[in-house]
Image (cartoon, grey):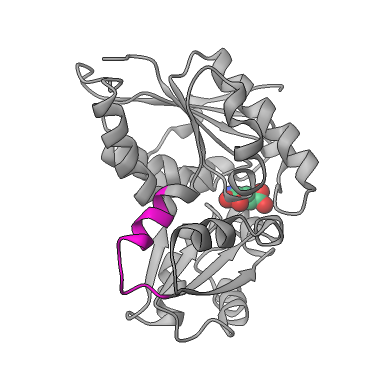
Amino acid sequence: MDTRPIGMFDSGVGGLTVLKEVIKQNPKENIIYLGDTKSFPYGSKSKDSIIELTKKGIEFLISKNVKIVIIACGTATSQALEEVKDNYPIPVIGIIDSTVEYIKNNEKLKKIGIIATAGTIRSNGWQNKIESKIKDVVILNKSCPLLAPMAEEGWTENEIAKLTIREYLKELKNIDCLILGCTHYPLFKKIIQEELGQSVEIINTGEKLSKDLEKELKESKKDNSENKNGDFEIYLTDTETNFIHVAEKLLKEEKISNKINKVEL
Ligand code: DGL
């Protein structure tokens, strides 16, 4: 048993879609979430900047005595995980591997769409990983730079969101699955599914990650098995944001503001 919390970070509300799945699958775990809202958006920054921000995020979480760090951000996973993960005494994982493993084990998924931030698509992080593990797949990439800012604004189900999604997805018809390669995008899942139809499987990376995490914590005897109910705490680098409203709606919890602390990285 390991009673230390799990650490997670993202540039803003996106990683909360991962937090939600981690709580669902691992309800006894305590979690420390860092939203680097001061540096949002990560998606339009250079690889060097993303590596720097990722190091700061990991080091902050390690200072909070976490047992594992989840990079709950596609942009940081695709551009910084491989560069930094071996520098730390605890495991650091990202959102890509569990989803690639899931697709590998599902032979029906051969035509794969990926939507993500500009930085993630430019890095080819998803495409390289998929092609190194799975043969005979067709991959269609599309960067959707407007979606993360819209999610931060809470515009995930209105008419503007519908039109934006329609425009971004128009080249992604006839796919078997769509990877939501940015953790902000599960907030648009309903309208993405409506746009693509029920025959396309929409993959929420947080869902795949949290199942693997549960298995991994149990097998390594690092789960917080004797805890009654896990809790979470949020640290933000800037609090002048819509974060609280989006978080309350997504996590269906009131009084999120009691769990929020401001931090300087
Ligand atoms: N949620 C992030 C991702 O998964 C970052 C979005 C952004 O900050 O641009 O890529």
- Asked whether, in this view, residue 146 is left or right of residue 48, the answer is left
Total number of numbered discs in the rendering: 0
Residue 166 rendering spot, x and y as whole percentages? 56, 81
Q: Is residue 55 magenta?
A: no
Name the one closer to the observer, 146 or 84.
Answer: 84
Q: In which quarter of the image is the N terminus?
A: top left
- Asked whether, in this view, residue 102 is left or right of residue 242, the answer is left
Q: Can residue 10 be seen in this view?
A: yes
- Asked whether, in this view, residue 136 is left or right of residue 61, the answer is left
Q: Which of the 4 image quadrants contains residue 248? A: top left
Q: Which of the 4 image quadrants contains residue 219? A: top left
x 54%, y 81%: residue = 172
Residue 265 rendering spot, x and y as whole percentages? 71, 23
x 32%, y 41%: residue = 212
> Does residue 188 lie above or below 48 as drawn?
below
> Does residue 136 lie above or below 255 as drawn?
below
Q: Is residue 28 visible?
A: no
Name the one closer to the observer, 23 or 104.
Answer: 104
Residue 137 rendering spot, x and y as whole percentages? 46, 73
Q: Is residue 105 magenta?
A: yes
Q: Which of the 4 image quadrants contains residue 23? A: top left
Residue 176 rendering spot, x and y as whole percentages? 39, 77
x 49%, y 50%: residue = 96
x 58%, y 42%: residue = 243
Span highlighted in magenta in the image: 98-110
